Amino acid sequence: MDMKMFRSSGILLHPSSLPETPGIGTIGAQAYKFVDWLKSAKQSIWQILPIGPTGYGDSPYASFSTYAGNPLLIDLDILVKRGYMMKSVATPPTYISSTGKIDYGSVVWWKLPVLKKAAEGFLTRCNLVDRNAYFDFKKENSWWLDNYAIFMSIKEVYDLKANEEHLFGAMWSNYWPKELASHDDKAVAEWENSHKDECEIYKVIQYFFFSQWKELKKYANDKGISIIGDIPIFVAPDSADVWSNQESFLLDENGAQTACAGVPPDYFSATGQLWGNPLYNWEQMEKDGFSWWIKRIKYMLSLVDYVRVDHFRGFEAYWKVPAGKKTAINGEWVKAPGQKLFEAIQKELGDIPLIAEDLGLITPEVLALRDNFNLPGMKILQCAFDKKEAGAAGNSNPFMPHMYPKNCVVYTGTHDNATLQGWLLHSSEEERKNIVDYLGLNCTNIEKATRDRTLCKELVRLAMSSVADFAIFPLQDIFSIGDEARMNIPSTTGGSNWQWRMDSNMMSNETAEWLKTMSVLYDRNSR
């Protein structure tokens, strides 16, 4: 897969973090404003996290569907302007704030009923052009949309019942009636027939999302901005994907997992990480030519310009933990058919723009799989100097900029890292001195250079100047924001995970000029 990568730079910002709209960022006016700001700063990439509907824990990496869009990101003002509902209906209650962190519980409680009202308004009041566009959308996406709508309508009924019974952890495989849980064709068809209105509402809401998303993407592309999307290697157990494709996962006859995904114990965790995702039945997937994966990649590339594939190493070998275990200690490495999979994808789709998230426990076999298809990997600048991670290898570690190949993407950090400034503030005196020496700074007061954000800004410059084809920066790092803006702490739920939102004044001309100057200086604006 020989993807074309022009020397470029850009910003990592999930749409949920955009400012000003009630409760959560959306793909409306502020998203367009952000694209304009990127253009003014001569940036050519906007990287996002997965855009699917989120559930418990609010993680974009645990979605009810790998194909559906997150209703919470739909912009209500656009729906009002198109006449699907009154402005008064879209006006949030006083407890929904347009600033500060995202309160997902409040947003879900308020916004989802509003979207259902808008969907009802669309079905009764939309014009002929919109109605035909909606019919086309349903026809083109029926292969996933029908199952998603049915799944969500069943889930809505039985989640409510489980809550009334105070049952925690109820889902399709352990709570739904057996004939529905097993996806029996007759039972599913009967449910759909008796719940047509509810299913139709879920489909309309998806039409809202993808209409808005595709308009935004076109606007970004017209401005010279490419979008990098994100595919988690695994899908959530409580998802339409697993429910409607049970033969493609390691499940028992009742739909319960026989094993789950994770990573083994390491320096940071004596018990490893138990993710809980169902594992793929690779033998079954190989029998049908990996059609599930080919559809998934093809569909994602209709929504974005590049795709970052999360946990790439899992395509070479994955950590398999038996069901029922409380930790990931007693797992085992199991080989995956990564070579055959990517050969099938390449045969069907050609050379496609994938980025391999090749972080974690990376073996020569993983690197060989990546390089066999000429996929760019990722370099995390924090890891170059962190003595507890790859930085312990000294100046020969692969995250040092002088070790980069051209065919890679450098990040100051990802959504799973501390912000760059937060990491610097917690770094040791030795680590900071190594940074100063590497940068060649004439710095007599390293503590001051850390706190006044000089080191943070110089590390951004270092990434910009590297040979890496792409340089991507979490927006928090551009503004040298500390721990309060961290997006996620891996292996934790709750807290402030996924809640950060930017301030609207961050889209300033001053910062745009700073980025523009560096992009021009280091030849990252040639497109």
Image (cartoon, helix red, strand yellow):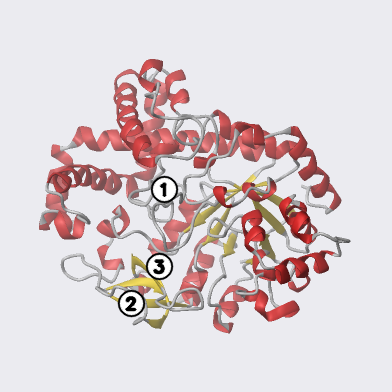
Tell me which numbered mark, 2 or 3, is placed earlier along the sequence: 3
Q: Do the residues labelled 1 and 3 touch (CB within 8 Å)?
A: no
Q: Distance between the residues labelled 2 and 3?
A: 23 Å
Amino acid type of disc 3? Phe
- Which of discs 2 and 3 lies nearer the camera? The answer is 2
- Residue 461 position, x and y percent, is 78, 55
Residue at the spot 33% in from the left edge and 31% down from the top edge: 110
Residue for badge 3:
290
The earlier-in-sequence mark between 1 and 2 is 1
The image position of residue 271, as x and y in percent, is 39, 77
> Which residue position holds label 2?
321
Question: Mark 1 = which residue?
Answer: 52
Q: At 60% from the left edge and 74% from the top edge, which residue is drawn? A: 388
The one nearer the camera, 65 or 498, is 498
Mark 1 or 2: in front is 2
> At x 66% / y 43%, what residue is drawn?
225
Q: Position of residue 384 (x, y in %)?
A: 69, 70
Q: What is the crowding at mark 1: few (fewer than 14 residues within 10 Å), some, or many (at least 20)? A: many
Q: Dots 2 and 3: beta carbons under 8 Å?
A: no
The number of discs equals 3
**Is residue 511 placed above or below 334 in the rendered structure?**
above
Can residue 380 be seen in the rendering of this structure?
no
Image location of residue 160, percent across then percent down: 18, 43
Q: Quadrant of the N terminus?
A: bottom right
Q: Residue 373 carries which label?
A: none
Where disc 2 sits, the SS reads strand
Q: Is residue 282 left or right of residue 78?
A: left
